[in-house]
Image (cartoon, rainbow, N blue to C red):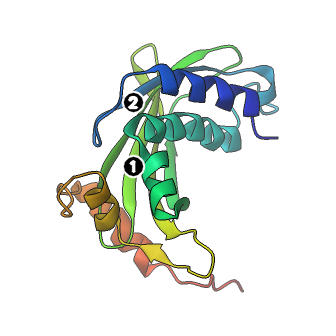
Amino acid sequence: MYPYVRFLKEALKARAATPLPPLETHISHHICWPWDIDPWMELNNGRTLTLYDLGRIPMAMRMGVGQVMKANGWGMTVAGNTTRYRRRVKLFERVTMKSRMLGWDDRFIYMEQSMWRDGEATSHLLLRSAVVQASRGRSGIVPPSELARAFGLAPESPPLPGWVLEWRGADAARPWPPQMA
C-alpha cells in the first residue's frame, strides 16, 4: 500500500519550506520502517522507488509545479527510470535523499535522486518524466519547453550530462514492445 501518511507529512513540510528554484536540490530525510523491508531485513527495492516518490513530489511542490500544471490542464507521469543500488539500508536506518531536475529534451524531463547514509551513497535513480495534457478531450505529451516557459525559464534545457544522454540512447534502442521468446 502507498504510504499516504508519510506522503502527507512530506507534503506539509514542502508547503512550509522556502520555494525551490528549478534545477536546485531538494533534501529530505527518511527512515526504513518495518513495512519497508524485505525478507533480508533491508529496504525493499520496490519500496525504494516509492520513497523516491516521497522526495520527488515535495521537490515539485516547492518548485510550484502543481499550480502550473493545474493552470494549464497538465499532468505528469513517470516515463522511465533506472536505479543503481550500492549499499544496503537496514531496518530503522535513516537516509538523506537528494532530488533534483537535470534538464529536458523535446519530450521528457530528466531528474536524478540519491539516498545517502553516513556520507555514503546507497542508491541512485535516474528518471524521466513526461508532462501530459490532462484536460478532457485532449491527450499527448506536452513539450517540456512549454513547462519551462510557464516557469519563466528559457525553453532550452541546460546541457544534459553525457551519462543521461547515453542512457536515453540505450533506452531508445531497446525494442518495444518487448520481444519475449
* Alpha-carbon span between mark 1 and mark 2: 11 Å
Quadrant where the C terminus lies? bottom right
Judging by the rendered image, the residue that carries numbered circle 2 is: 26
The one nearer the camera, 170 or 142, is 142
Q: Residue at x 29, y 51 (%)?
A: 151
Q: Residue at x 52, y 64 (%)?
A: 73
Badge 2 amino acid: His
Q: Residue 103 vs residue 89: left or right?
A: left
Disc number for residue 138: none
| Rendered location of residue 154, percent (x, y) | 17, 58
Q: Which label's residue is closer to the chain start, 1 or 2?
A: 2
Judging by the rendered image, the residue that carries numbered circle 1 is: 111
Q: Residue furthest front?
A: 71
The one nearer the camera, 28 or 10, is 10
Q: Does the residue at mark 1 contact the one at mark 2 (Cβ under 8 Å)?
A: no
Q: Residue at x 80, y 27 (%)?
A: 35
Q: In the displayed structure, would residue 37 be above or below residue 129? A: above
The one nearer the camera, 89 or 145, is 145
Crowd class of label 1 (few under 14; some 14 to 19; many from 20; radius 10 Å): many
